[in-house]
Image (cartoon, rainbow, N blue to C red):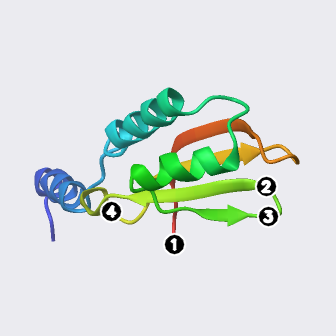
């Protein structure tokens, strides 16, 4: 039987070991947002966006159904359930329309 005081310590240890830190990806998310907002502007071509993403070392894919590039960046120190997600939307003529960079959380 675990006493009340020991349960609190056990819970704190479990949370620390699980990497449960809500701000874990905040710095990476802000870094990516700043980089993309400084290097890209509305109306840029898909080619320019490709160059910026490749120079930054950001792996991405194209979602043809939503006409966007997308990337998910994980940090092993933060666990598998936290990431930075990047979405770059294009117009039908292939010009950049919008950038979204946000912290995301997944549950398996």
Element on which disc 2 rests: loop
Residue that extends furthest to the right in the rendered view of this protein: 92
Badge 3 density bin: few <14, some 14–19, many ≥20, Cα 10 Å: few
Q: Is residue 37 above or below residue 18?
A: above
Q: Are marks 4 and 1 in contact (CB under 8 Å)?
A: no
Task: Give coordinates of residue 50: x percent, y percent.
Answer: 57, 53
Q: In front of the other: label 4 or label 1?
A: 4
At x 61%, y 56%, the residue is 70
On the picture, is 76 further left or further right than 43?
Answer: left
Q: Return the residue nearer the eye: 19 or 37.
A: 37
Q: Are marks 1 and 2 in contact (CB under 8 Å)?
A: no
Name the residue beneath numbered marker 2.
67
Name the residue beneath numbered marker 1.
108
Q: CA distance from mark 4 to mark 3?
A: 29 Å
The circle drawn on residue 64 is 3
Q: Return the residue nearer the eye: 53 or 9.
A: 53
Which of disc 3 and disc 4 is earlier in sequence?
A: 3
Q: In front of the other: label 1 or label 2?
A: 2
Q: CA distance from mark 1 to mark 2?
A: 27 Å
Q: In front of the other: label 1 or label 3?
A: 3
On the picture, is 15 further left or further right than 104?
Answer: left
Which of disc 1 and disc 4 is earlier in sequence?
A: 4
Task: Give coordinates of residue 75: x percent, y percent.
Answer: 31, 58
Q: CA distance from mark 4 to mark 1?
A: 12 Å
Q: Quadrant of the N terminus?
A: bottom left
Q: Are marks 4 and 3 in contact (CB under 8 Å)?
A: no
């Amino acid at each position: 039987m675990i006493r009340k005081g020991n349960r609190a310590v056990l819970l704190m240890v479990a949370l620390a070991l699980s990497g449960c830190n809500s701000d874990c990806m905040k710095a990476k998310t802000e870094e990516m947002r700043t980089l993309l907002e400084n290097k890209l502007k509305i109306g840029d071509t898909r080619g320019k966006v490709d160059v910026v993403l490749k120079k930054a070392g950001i792996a991405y894919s194209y979602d043809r159904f939503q006409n966007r590039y997308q990337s998910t960046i994980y940090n092993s120190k933060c666990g598998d359930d936290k990431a930075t997600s990047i979405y770059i939307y294009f117009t039908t003529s292939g010009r950049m329309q919008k950038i979204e960079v946000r912290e995301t959380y997944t549950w398996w």
